[in-house]
């Protein structure tokens, strides 16, 4: 019986010798197809990049920024202080669950960002970073990028965010109005008040306006202005408006450099309101009718003031009168 011969598959280069090249067995991609494919990939990448930039610009993308890249002083803050218990609770929340809500920033260029809103969250993260010895999990902050049209719009965004999230005092609200005008962000108190609190009721705007004399006269003197109750603040503003000497008396009573707690300061403010107004605020009596006291000299007087008039009031008389007064005191 004839022995069967085992069949072996041909080598891959069997036909290449006859065809001239192995690659001839698999047709190469047409150049026009490759160009079209590359163009499609490039277009898709450009579209994706454009959408990413738009999402970042419109605040639809959360960025992770280094803490030291954020400038807190980009805007004058409306919040003067942060309650210690509230800050502790916020830090415990971040420590347990991480940062839940991003802050809002604007791009200042050069890798720097100006804080618009989220001051307490940024403060809590910085405290955690320092307390932990610089742990990386607290070295960055989640942020949304905002591009306000101008600086006034940035202030409006800050105030609106805090009006929703935080219970600011009327002093703090009035202070941001006064400071925004002082720094030239707005041209007038009226413009600042109507722009920053455009969504507030007329009653609330009226109370903010009423606190402005208190801010103007005593900002930097008061230690705990954010803790002044509404009724006390309105009474203080009224006294400052009606009594020109009230601010000076109050500044002296607060004794700069003297240790005070919020209760001490409130007691000083309430006591100042109970005192009578300065004499200068009372109606001044009129001068007496001119009376002849010597040839060509008439005298008019009232408490605190004496006037001489007439042809007899010469330079020589004034000099003699001055010398005589010096001998009397």
Image (cartoon, rainbow, N blue to C red):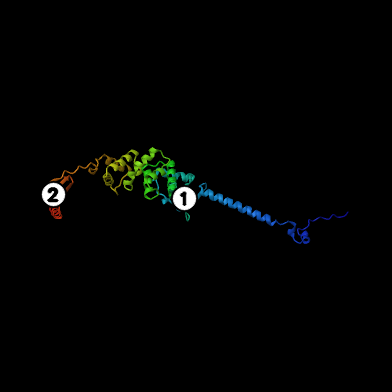
User: Which quadrant of the figure has residue 166?
Assistant: top left
Using the image as rendered, state which of residue 227 and residue 124 is in the foreground.
227
Q: Is residue 82 visible?
A: no
| Label 2 element class | strand
Using the image as rendered, state which of residue 77 and residue 9 is in the foreground.
77
Observer-side mark, 1 or 2, equals 2
272 to the left or right of 76: left
- Residue furthest to the left in view is 294
Vertical relation: 179 (above or below) 203: below
Q: Residue at x 15, y 47 (%)?
A: 299
| Image label count | 2
User: Which quadrant of the figure has residue 86?
Assistant: top left
Q: Is residue 300 visible?
A: yes
Q: Position of residue 163 (x, y in %)?
A: 42, 42
Q: Residue at x 61, y 54 (%)?
A: 42
Circle 1/circle 2 CB separation < 8 Å? no
Q: Position of residue 63 (x, y in %)?
A: 50, 49
Q: Position of residue 242 (x, y in %)?
A: 28, 42
325 to the left or right of 236: left
List the residue tagged with mark 2.
297
Q: Where, quadrant-wise, is the N terminus in this rendering? A: bottom right
List the residue tagged with mark 1.
106
């Amino acid at each position: 019986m004839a022995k069967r011969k085992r069949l072996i598959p041909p080598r891959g280069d069997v036909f290449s010798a006859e065809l001239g090249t192995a690659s001839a067995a698999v047709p190469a991609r047409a150049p026009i197809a490759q160009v079209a494919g590359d163009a499609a990939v490039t277009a898709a990448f450009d579209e994706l990049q454009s959408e990413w930039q738009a999402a970042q610009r419109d605040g639809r993308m959360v960025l992770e920024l280094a803490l030291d890249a954020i400038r807190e002083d980009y805007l004058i803050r409306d919040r003067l202080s942060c309650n210690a218990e509230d800050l502790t609770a916020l830090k415990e929340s971040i420590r347990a669950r991480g940062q839940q809500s991003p802050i809002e920033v604007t791009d200042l260029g050069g890798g720097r960002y100006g804080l618009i809103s989220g001051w307490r969250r940024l403060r809590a993260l910085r405290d955690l970073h320092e307390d932990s010895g610089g742990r990386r999990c607290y070295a960055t902050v989640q942020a949304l990028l905002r591009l306000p049209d101008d600086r006034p719009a940035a202030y409006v965004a800050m105030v609106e965010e805090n009006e929703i999230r935080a219970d600011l005092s009327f002093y703090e609200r009035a202070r941001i109005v006064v400071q925004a005008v002082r720094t030239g962000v707005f041209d007038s108190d009226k413009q600042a008040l109507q722009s920053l609190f455009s969504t507030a009721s007329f009653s609330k705007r009226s109370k903010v306006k009423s606190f402005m004399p208190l801010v103007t006269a005593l900002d930097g003197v008061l230690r705990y202005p954010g803790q002044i109750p509404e009724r006390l603040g309105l009474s203080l503003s009224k006294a400052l408006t009606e009594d020109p000497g009230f601010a000076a008396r109050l500044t002296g009573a607060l004794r700069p450099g003297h240790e005070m707690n919020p209760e001490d300061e409130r007691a000083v403010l309430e006591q100042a309101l109970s005192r009578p107004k300065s004499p200068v605020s009372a109606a001044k009596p009129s001068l007496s009718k001119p009376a002849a006291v010597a040839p060509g000299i008439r005298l008019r007087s009232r408490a605190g003031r004496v006037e001489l008039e007439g042809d007899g009031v010469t330079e020589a008389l004034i000099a003699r009168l001055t010398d005589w007064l010096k001998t009397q005191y």
